[in-house]
Amino acid sequence: MARGRPVTDEDYEAVRRMHAEGQGRNAIARALKRSGRTISKIADELDLTFDRADEVRAATEVRQADLAALRAKLALDLTYDAMKVREQMWSETVVYNFGGKDNTYSQHRFDEAPADVKRSLSTTLGVLVEKSLKLSPPENDVEGLAAVDAWLKGMMGGS
């Protein structure tokens, strides 16, 4: 089996320097036109490591914090959406019909949404509140959570 070119002092120095610059094993191997295995052996001899566990752990923590912030924002947006839906239940509403054999349009204004529309809005409201609470549950608010559960069941027609 053919052997590669011998490792030189310049190779050792280049690995030491590039490692200190924060370059990874594969990047060093490409730059020096050596195999990853050769670079790993040199690094071992120089007591260098390419272990990035701390870097990865820190990046994971940052990513988790970012996702938590996005979930909190989404929960807040869902809560605002729920408030808008609830407001629609008690706002002036236009109910319309379009069609028939003569393809006519008719509409009626009501001071507030009719019962069937309120039922539909209540369902939407319940889903929005439930999803908001799931994304950002209240902390140690057992009594408040039970009250919300009871309210949601009442809105959804449960017992």
Image (cartoon, helix red, strand yellow):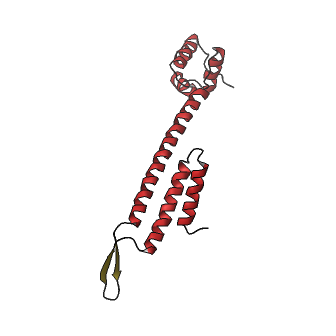
Q: Which image quadrant for residue 158? A: bottom right
Residue 133's place in the image compared with 126, above or below, is above
**Quadrant of the rendering where the C terminus is positioned:** bottom right
Q: Residue furthest bottom?
A: 101
Viewed as shown, does residue 117 lie left or right of 32? Answer: left
Q: Which image quadrant for residue 148? A: bottom right
Residue 12's place in the image compared with 131, above or below, is above
Percent from the top left, x then y, of residue 84? 40, 59
Q: How many marks?
A: 0
Residue 157's place in the image compared with 59, above or below, is below
Viewed as shown, does residue 44 lie left or right of 17? Answer: right
Q: Residue furthest right?
A: 1
Q: Which residue is located at x 48 percent, y 70 percent?
A: 119
**Quadrant of the rendering where the N terminus is positioned:** top right
Percent from the top left, x then y, of residue 15? 56, 17
Percent from the top left, x then y, of residue 116? 45, 74
Between 142 and 70, which is closer to the camera in this rendering? 142
Between 16 and 57, which is closer to the camera in this rendering? 57
Residue 117's place in the image compared with 40, above or below, is below
Q: Which residue is located at x 49 percent, y 39 percent?
A: 66
Q: Which residue is located at x 66 percent, y 15 percent?
A: 45
Q: Residue furthest top?
A: 9
